[in-house]
Structures are given as C-alpha cells and as structure tokens.
Amino acid sequence: MALVLDQKRYCSDHARIRLGTHEVEATCMPVLQKFSSHSLTEQLAVNLADRTDSKYLMPIRALSRFLQALIEDHTVLQSAEHRIFTYENTYFDTPGWDMYLRHHNGKLNRRKLRFRRYHETDISYLEVKLKNNKQRTVKTRILWDDEKSVDVPTLNAQMEARLYVNYRRITLWNRLTDERLTLDYDLHFLRPGQGKAVQLSKYFIAEIKREGKVYGSSFFRNAKNYGFTPLPISKYCVGVCLTDSGELKRNRFKPLLKKLSEPQHSGELVG
C-alpha cells in the first residue's frame, strides 16, 4: 500500500495543539535533575522492538513523588538540554475505522499505523505496531525524510490521517534489567478538521517495556506497593472515544472512560 504523508500539515496541526507545557513540570524538573542520564545512542543499543509491555494509569499530582522513588535504579534520557520531550503522533485508519474496531472487538494480530515526530530533535518515523496472538508488541519503523509517499507492505487498505495524539514524555532506563519506562502526560487529542483538542491533564500513563515478563520488574514491585496495577490502555483508542460524537462503538472501553472521569485516588504517593 502506498501511503501519502502530509508532514507539513501534521506539524502545523500539532503546533495548534501544543501551546505550552503542563504545570506539573515545575515540580518534576528539580527531581529529574537528580537522575544520572543516558543518551539516545545508549538507549537504542537495547532493542525492544519485540517486547512485552504493561501500562498503568496514575494521577498526575503523583508524578514528582513517583520519580523520586526511581532515582537510584534508573537513568533518564537526555538529548542536548532536554530531559522531557514532546511527541507528535498522527494515527492512520481506514474510512470505516477498521483498526480502532479490531482493538475494540479484542482481536489479536492487530496493527496500528502512525507517523511520529519528535519535536525537540525534529526526527520523524513512520511506524507500524503489531499486537500479536502471544500478547507481544512488535514495532517496525521507517526513518522519514521529505518523501511524499511510502509503501507499507503489511497493510493493503485505504488509510487516512484520523487522529492527532500529542503529549510530553519522560523516558527512564534500568540498566540492570534492560527495562525501559516511559511516563506520558499532558495528552491532547484532536481529529483532523476539528477545531478544539480534548486534553487529558489529570493523569499520566506509565509503561514498562521489557524483552521478558514485566512481573519481574522493579518498577512493577514499586507500583504494586502503592496499590497500582496494570491497566490495558491505548492512547489511540482513548483519543478516538474522547473525540467521538457517538458514531463508534465504545462498550469495551467504558470502564476506562469512567475511570478517567472519576475523582482521583492517589494512595500513599501523594501526601
């Protein structure tokens, strides 16, 4: 399948979404400065393109306290002066939302297609993520330059840009276990052609990425001690639901959407 990308348009639309940073960064930055750092080259030496992963939904006001508990075991990704990065994801789907519906219906061997730009470094990739029938995530990606179209051999349906997902990310690495931990917050969702983005500002999403089972992770034990358990969550599917006007099925995601609308319970992490 030949996919035509309009990178200039995507960048312009993401610029409308991201008008500033989240207030939580005022408390997070002093904590992040206490971490030892690692480079992108060091991080890429640990290939997690075929991995297991586990996600957690946590209250944003717990983020700085949570970071404090990870200083001894983790290093933080740093590029130039940046330790927090802006991710600009443009997701593609068919006119009938086939990719969203396969996820909603619980199908395995399902794919998602996105164009990702790292704002601070101005590097872009076209990525295909596969969730296979062994519950492993397999990601392939193509470094993107100024070409106008690219062949995606694993997909054979008509695809179009359907959703922008814009957020801030902190990436931590546990060298002893080769475990990568991403902390995503200040999420904004916008469908192309819509006027106003939907913001998810009260929570952050933590994700462990490992080659083996996540249950041997030090992060998993730490999160469990504070009463947090893994929760299936897809930024794409959440964004589709939050920007939808009733067109699409959402029964599978109702418990998660309800949780996002409830008052926060942050346990012992927040005093």
Image (tube, helix red, strand yellow):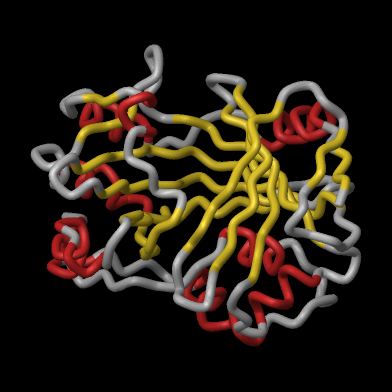
Farthest front residue in view: 153
State the image quarter where residue 107 is shown: bottom right
Name the quarter where the C terminus is drawn: bottom left
Farthest left residue?
72
Is residue 103 depicted above or below 194 in this figure?
below
Q: In the image shown, does 195 or 140 lie closer to the viewer?
A: 140
Q: Residue at x 85, y 61 (%)?
A: 156
In the rendered view, tell whether residue 85 sits above or below residue 188: above
Locate residue 209: give its quadrant: bottom left
Question: 118 or 16, which is in the foreground?
Answer: 118
Residue at 21 percent of width and 63 percent of height: 220
The residue located at (26%, 49%) in the rendering is 179
Query: Residue 113: x and y, percent?
Result: 70, 53
Give the side of residue 74 with respect to residue 235, left or right: left
Using the rendered view, name the quadrant where residue 77 is placed. Answer: top left
The percent position of residue 137, horizontal first and vertical second, equals 48, 62
Q: Is residue 49 left or right of residue 30?
A: right
Between 183 and 112, the one nearer to me in the picture: 112
Give how far across and how far down residue 29 sits, in percent.
30, 28
Residue that lies at the very extreme toward the top in this rendered image: 80
Residue 76 image offset from top left, x and y in percent = 27, 32
Count of numbered badges drawn on the protein? 0
In the picture provided, is 147 more to the left or to the right than 266?
right
Residue drawn at (68%, 40%) of the image: 126
